Image: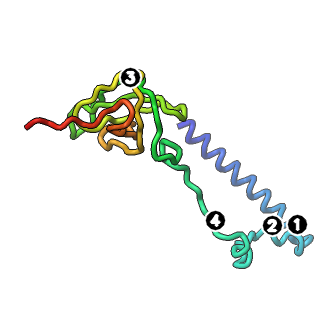
Amino acid sequence: MNFLRKGISLLSLGIRTQCATYQAITQAATLQPAVSQGLISRAMASLAQMHQTGPHIKYRKSRNPLNGNPFAKGVVLKTLIKKPKKPNSANRKCVLVRMSNGKEMVAYVPGIGHNLQEHNIVLVRVGRVKDCPGVKLKCVRGKYDLPHVIKQKV
């Protein structure tokens, strides 16, 4: 309740200061109408000004975990087993990788079975696993120390 009272008192104080500055501006306007006309009504930019500056483009930060690169080489630090989010239940085989750009991230190992251990070298690509939070990379099978998936005997 005290916060509410404090907020209202600060609000009224802010309104009072704004009124005081407005009164000062209006008094100045009566003394010198040509000079302070711009202070009271700030107009929007004219079409000519907008044409000169060009469009206002907001540049968004890239969400790519590899800074725009398609692949990165990395060293396995630890093998992990991750559990997926709510409706799914399985054990997702993942590895913690220190990549060549210095980042340490979790990468998913696709396919059935792998022989990755600590100090193995893998190639990772961008590709998130939807049901595992925080896993934004996938390992590439058949490159460096991660072999292709072995064909299942039926």
Q: Earlier in the sequence, mark 3 or mark 2?
A: 2
Q: Quadrant of the C terminus?
A: top left
What residue did someone put label 1 on?
A: 28
Q: Earlier in the sequence, mark 4 or mark 2?
A: 2
Amino acid type indicated by mark 3: Lys
As measured in the structure, the alpha-carbon distance from the residue carrying label 1 to the one carrying label 2 is: 10 Å
What residue did someone put label 4 on?
A: 56
Q: Earlier in the sequence, mark 1 or mark 2?
A: 1
Residue 91 at x, y percent in the picture: 24, 31
Q: SS of the residue at dot 4?
A: loop
Marks 4 and 2: CB-CB under 8 Å?
no
Residue 85 visible:
no
Amino acid type indicated by mark 1: Ala
Q: Can you tell which of label 3 and label 1 is closer to the viewer?
A: 3
Marks 3 and 2: CB-CB under 8 Å?
no
Q: Earlier in the sequence, mark 4 or mark 3?
A: 4
What residue did someone put label 3 on?
A: 78
Residue 144 at x, y percent in the picture: 39, 33
Q: Which mark is residue 107?
A: none
Camera-side residue of 103 and 150 = 150
Q: SS of the residue at dot 2?
A: helix
As measured in the structure, the alpha-carbon distance from the residue carrying label 4 to the one carrying label 2 is: 25 Å
What residue did someone put label 2 on?
A: 39
